[in-house]
């Protein structure tokens, strides 16, 4: 049960699709002082804060001067600083491949179950190409709040 919850959280975090009206930009940091081939220009989360039991979308805008024909995304999620989940995603399932030089977006949407714990989360995303070379690595925080609920009578 916990593993399914964390998988849903991770999937949500990678969420990147169309920008919705409630989308807000989030601050992100690179994982080090490397000169990455993929430069991230923004992370947007909709809605922000994420509402449990409601759909959410995460959008990562990036640019590259290289052609990317495939690869993986490694996502690690922490809840109040504690690691709670990690998984890999096929890059070409999160964006259109091949990625040619220029701007591109990695996107995914997910609905978190109503029992997802509220609180502060952080996500680290590493993108590697088909040969396993690291293209970029970023981390950013987000908050999961309560969804408005209706009380049964």
Image: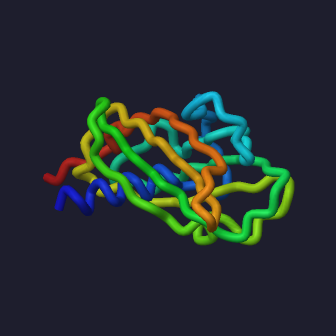
Q: Residue furthest left?
A: 153
Identity of the residue drawn at 55% across and 43% down:
45
Identity of the residue drawn at 83% across and 63% down:
100
Residue 83 lies, in percent from the top left, at 29, 41
Determine if residue 20 is in view.
Answer: no
Residue 132 lies, in percent from the top left, at 58, 60
Residue 40 lies, in percent from the top left, at 69, 41
Q: Nearer the viewer, residue 41 or 48?
A: 41
Identity of the residue drawn at 30% across and 54% down:
6
Q: Nearer the viewer, residue 35 or 121?
A: 35
Apparent side of residue 126 relative to residue 43 in the rendered image (left or right): left
Identity of the residue drawn at 30% across and 57% down:
113
The answer to which quarter of the image holds residue 81 is top left
Q: Nearer the viewer, residue 68 or 11?
A: 68
Residue 87 lies, in percent from the top left, at 39, 59
Q: Quadrant of the N terminus?
A: bottom left
Determine if residue 92 is in view.
Answer: yes
Apparent side of residue 34 relative to residue 68 in the rendered image (left or right): left
On screen, residue 22 above or below 3:
above
- How many discs appear? 0
Apparent side of residue 110 relative to residue 82 in the rendered image (left or right): right
């Amino acid at each position: 049960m916990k593993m399914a919850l964390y998988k849903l959280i991770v999937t949500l975090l990678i969420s990147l699709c169309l920008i919705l009206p409630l989308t807000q930009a989030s601050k992100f940091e690179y994982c080090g002082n490397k000169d990455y081939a993929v430069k991230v220009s923004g992370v947007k989360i909709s809605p922000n804060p994420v509402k449990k039991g409601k759909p959410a979308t995460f959008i990562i805008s990036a640019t590259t001067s290289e052609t990317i024909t495939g690869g993986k995304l490694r996502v690690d999620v922490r809840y109040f600083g504690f690691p709670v989940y990690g998984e890999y995603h096929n890059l070409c399932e999160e964006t259109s491949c091949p990625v040619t030089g220029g701007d591109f977006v990695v996107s995914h949407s997910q609905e978190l179950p109503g029992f997802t714990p509220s609180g502060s989360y952080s996500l680290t995303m590493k993108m590697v190409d088909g040969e396993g070379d690291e293209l970029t690595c970023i981390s950013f925080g987000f908050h999961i709040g309560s969804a408005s609920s209706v009380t049964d009578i």
